[in-house]
Image: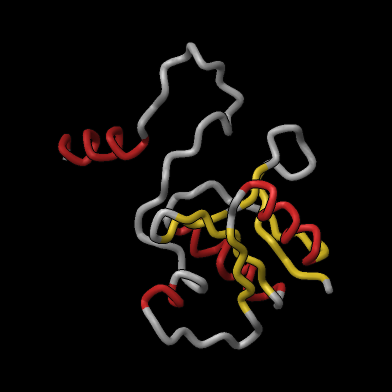
Amino acid sequence: MNIFVLLYNSGTDKEGIHSIELKGRTIVLMFEDKEDATRYCGLLEAQDFPLPTVEIIDIDEIKDFCIKLDYECKLVEKNFVPKTAEDRLLISPPQKNLDVDDWGGKSDNEEKIDINTIKENLEKLL
């Protein structure tokens, strides 16, 4: 069965998959419907998160990937309706994003930039 996932830097050696943190667990979202995955991308972009691409992949490949890294995977079925606050994260990204290291290809000795701190400092100037 094919599903849709959200990838960053697709097809490069810096490729990464979108995941969420929930109760100390890393969860990879898998979408049954491409439109749902695309909508989720739009919500991420609205939060100033880097825009992932929607990629089709075999569900067994993602499950194997998750098992190897001790991640969980959750399938967001077409027309999914959340029943709990946790379920809501499957259709709408959390308000706070975790920092992601090395997307820009920075070396370890370069200073890391905290975007949130920069935003706060700029807002103070107004």
Q: Which part of the image, by quadrant, shows the C terminus?
A: top left
Please give the name of the residue rendered at 56% of the width and 67% of the height, measured from the top-left corner.
Answer: 40
Give the percent coordinates (x, y) of residue 34.
71, 72
Q: Quadrant of the N terminus?
A: bottom right
Q: How is the image coloured?
A: secondary structure
Left or right placement of residue 112 versus residue 58 in this view: left
Q: Quadrant of residue 67?
A: bottom right
Front residue (pair 48, 86): 86
Total numbered labels placed on residues in the image: 0
Report the residue at 64% width, 69% height from top.
Answer: 37
Q: Is residue 3 above or below residue 70?
A: below
At 64% across and 67% down in the image, what residue appears?
Answer: 38
Q: Quadrant of residue 4?
A: bottom right
The answer to whether residue 103 is above or below residue 20 is above
Compared across the picture, whether 49 is left or right of 15 comes to: left
Measured as percent of width and height from the top left, residue 81 is found at: 51, 87
Residue 8 drawn at (x, y percent) = 65, 46
Nearest the eye: 38 or 125: 38
* Whether residue 49 is situated above or below residue 74 in the rendered picture: above
> Where is 90 relative to 19, above or below?
below
Of all residues shown, which one is farthest toward the top? 109
Please state which of residues 112 and 90 is positioned toward the viewer in this rendering.
90
Determine the residue positioned at 35% across, 32% down: 114
